[in-house]
Image (spheres, helix red, strand yellow):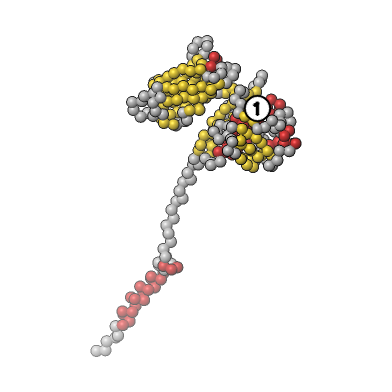
Amino acid sequence: MYSRPRFKSRLLPLLLVFIIAALLPGCQGKGNTPEPSATPPEAAQPAAKMPLTVYYIKYTENDSNLVREIHQVNQSPEVARAALEELIKGNPETPGAVRVLPAGTQVLGVRIDPSGLATVDFSPEVLSANVGSAGEALGIASIVNTLTEFPTINRVAFSVNGQVDSRTKDWWGHVGLYEQPFKRDLSKVYEPAIWITSPLPSQQIKSQVEVQGSAMVFEAAVCARVVDETGRVLAQGYTTASEGAPGRGDFKLTLDFNPTAPGKGTVEAYSTSPKDGSIINLYRVPVTW
């Protein structure tokens, strides 16, 4: 009996396999390279912060003075410029305190020479401040005191667009730049009455911690202590500042502090009320040990 060729029965299944493979999506992509899987972008990390000390003007019904504040700003290698930018754009935290530098002012440059003289070059907008005669002197002091917080700066001079012409020397009208450079002057800094400059916030302290700062208090009497996080006083002492109120003086004292275990707390400086002996003008710095 005649039998049919069997090659057709073998060919049909092969053709079906090739057709199905060609129709499957993604299997024959360009270059046969699979697309990479999508990964969610990393969450943006908050900018690292650094503390900067700035001075603003505060107006009251009877007087005007300066207030000292510590602001947390984005870290920058140009710390002097960053402090000036905070004076221009930052928001004072003390009720009644205001910025003196006009909002449109730009810091064109800060040059610090080896002798400690810092020359700040401002844009012309700086000359448009309108703060009155008392505010003009305090406004200059706010800039000078802010910059002289840095140990490499002891005097400050100003220029505008790189020049110190007659208009620049007139500055804001009542108080000019004829006697610049200017030196640090804390005599009109009324708030806070006491502050600590050493130790620094978050510093690790050891035995015999040295406490330094500035005070404008009755009879120059300043107390200091180390307090743990439960409120227990671990060390305390007393000293007098170099000048009493209404003047402002520096103070320094050493506390014998011998922690028995690692911990954290605060170094505090304060004065006592002449009326009832209660603690007033308390200033705290967080520390570890």
Left or right, residue 105 beside residue 206: right
Tell me the quadrant of the picture where the N terminus can be found.
Answer: bottom left
Q: Position of residue 165 (x, y in %)?
A: 73, 38
The amino acid on which the numbered mark 1 sits, given as a three-letter code, is Leu
Left or right, residue 61 beside residue 243: right
Q: Tell me if residue 160 can be seen.
A: yes
Residue under the point 27% across and 87% down: 3
Helix, strand or loop under label 1: helix
Q: Quadrant of residue 136?
A: top right
Name, please, the residue furthest toward the bottom: 1
Name, please, the residue furthest toward the right: 166
- Please give the residue where the numbered disc 1 appears in the rendered image: 138
Q: Against 19, is 223 above or below?
A: above
Question: Which one is in front, 32 or 267?
Answer: 267
Instruction: Give the class, few, some or many, for how many residues have Cα within 10 Å of label 1's Cα (few <14, many ≥20).
Output: many
Question: Which one is in front, 50 or 235?
Answer: 235
Question: Which one is in front, 161 or 115?
Answer: 115
Q: Position of residue 284 (x, y in %)?
A: 48, 25
